[in-house]
Amino acid sequence: MVDKKVIQRKLQKMKQYLGELATFADLSFEEYVNNFQNRRTVERLIQLIVDVAIDINAHTVVDAGNPPPQDSYDSFIQGAKLNMFSLDFANKIAPSTGERNIIVHEYEQIDDGVVIAA
């Protein structure tokens, strides 16, 4: 059974991170790329938001008696199968896990255009 207090706490954290991220919404591309503090803060907030979403998804999927999602992307697809949100939304948001992995693991050069657009 899903621990509602855990989910509520995670959702509260996500709300906080989204509010913090919103303070950067009016930055121009130039203001973003030319200020490493802006870039690193935005990157970290995106990472935190995606991490919380993945945690909520995985927690809910497992608590529903299913095996853990295969990966972070799959956590969104599995969440949609449990009617946490629509499959259309899951397909739109799941790719954020790839950007999160690039930020965290430095697999590739971070595309500032993708980050600022997000």
Image (spheres, helix red, strand yellow):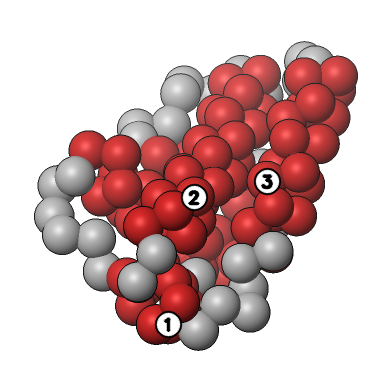
The residue carrying pointer 3 sits among few (fewer than 14), some (14 to 19) or many (20 or more) residues within 10 Å by Cα, namely: some
Q: In the rendered picture of this protein, how many numbered marks are placed on residues?
A: 3
Check disc 3 and report the residue beneath it.
17
Q: Relative to 106, is 64 on the left or the right?
A: right
Nearer-N-terminus badge (2/1): 1
Q: Which residue is mark 2?
A: 41
Task: Look at the picture and state if 62 lies above or below 81.
Answer: above
Q: Looking at numbered disc 2 in the image, what kind of residue is underneath it?
A: Thr
Label 2 – label 3 distance at C-alpha:
11 Å
Rendered image: mark on residue 29: 1
Secondary element under disc 2, as helix, strand or loop, is helix
User: How crowded is the residue under tag 1: few (<14 C-alpha within 10 Å), some, or many (20+)?
Assistant: few
Q: Earlier in the sequence, mark 3 or mark 1?
A: 3
Earlier sequence position, callout 2 versus callout 3? 3
User: How far is disc 3 from disc 1 in space, using C-alphas?
Assistant: 21 Å
38 or 16: which is nearer to us?
38
Quadrant of residue 62 within the rendered picture? top right
Q: Given the image, on which type of amino acid does mark 3 rest?
A: Tyr
- In this rendering, is residue 85 above or below 75? below
Residue 65 visible (yes or no): yes
Residue 51: give x, y in percent of width and height: 51, 36
The reply to whether the C-beta atoms of the residues labelled 3 and 1 are less than 8 Å apart is no
Q: Position of residue 33 (x, y in %)?
A: 35, 72
Q: Secondary structure at mark 1?
A: helix
Q: Please tell me whether mark 3 sits on a helix, a strand or a loop.
A: helix
* Residue type, label 1: Phe
